[in-house]
Amino acid sequence: MPEGKPLVVPEDGLTTRQRRNRPLVMVHTGDGKGKSTAAFGLAIRSWNQGWNVGVFQFVKSAKWRIGEQTVLERLGELHEQTGEGGPVAWHKMGAGWSWSRKEGSTEDHAADAIEGWAEIKRALAEERHDLYVLDEFTYPINWGWLDIDDVVETLRSRPGRQYVVMTGRRADAKLVEVADLVTEMTKVKHPMDVGQKGQRGIEW
């Protein structure tokens, strides 16, 4: 895409403006670091445009407050106080899920994920948000907790002008197919390779 210009202009009967404003389904996947970080950066950019942003966080423990949550919620408060930017809603799906699996059963976590997806479907039907960040969303799909065909059909048939970005490793092929933009983060080097754990300000 030299100078930001598409290599091909489709014969779809749409004007440049109409084509530019078509809402996107986006997937950030791969084994490299930065999938969620990129999605939250997109959320901040969308907030600046006055969009209504909804974050739906899967997998991570509900007790774990990540730095991006604090920033986006503060931006939501700023919107309420001054009208700047757009509203922000942050949802954690039930009790969440920690990598240690110390809290709750698999059945509990599956039920939380199912209810979380049901809430997203309700929000999409109501056209509640302009941008949806479905963080770590590939995992409940890969574990069989969510029906990938239902996910794909819901995304494909969503009404209005709603953008959706999903993160997580090993995105299902059907999810990749329905998406308009797919980025795969590839790890080249990582501090964990030499035994260094996550750092404040970098990982959280």
Image (spheres, grey):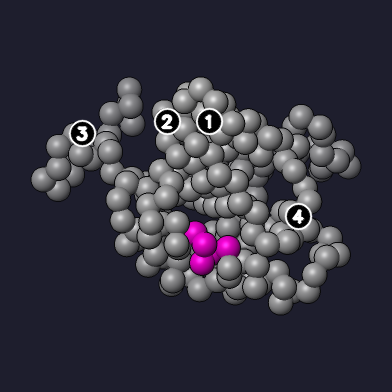
Along the viewing direction, whichever of 76 and 34 lies nearer the viewer = 76
Q: Secondary structure at mark 2?
A: loop
Select label 1 or label 4 by which is in front.
Answer: 1
Disc on the earlier residue, 4 or 3: 3
Kindly identify which numbered label has been placed on residue 50: 2
Disc on the earlier residue, 1 or 3: 3
Select label 4 or label 3 by which is in front.
Answer: 4
Residue 16 placement: quadrant: top left
Residue behind mark 4: 61
Query: Are discs 4 and 3 less than 8 Å apart at CB?
Result: no
Estimate how packed mark 2 is, as few (under 14), some (14 to 19) or many (20 or more) residues with alpha carbons within 10 Å. some
| Residue type at numbered disc 4 | Ser
- What is the distance, in whole Å, between disc 4 and disc 3 at their CAs? 41 Å
- What is the distance, in whole Å, between disc 1 and disc 4 at their CAs? 28 Å
| Residue type at numbered disc 2 | Gly
Q: Is 19 one of the magenta-colored residues? A: no
Q: Residue at x 72, y 73 (%)?
A: 108
Kindly identify which numbered label has been placed on residue 80: 1
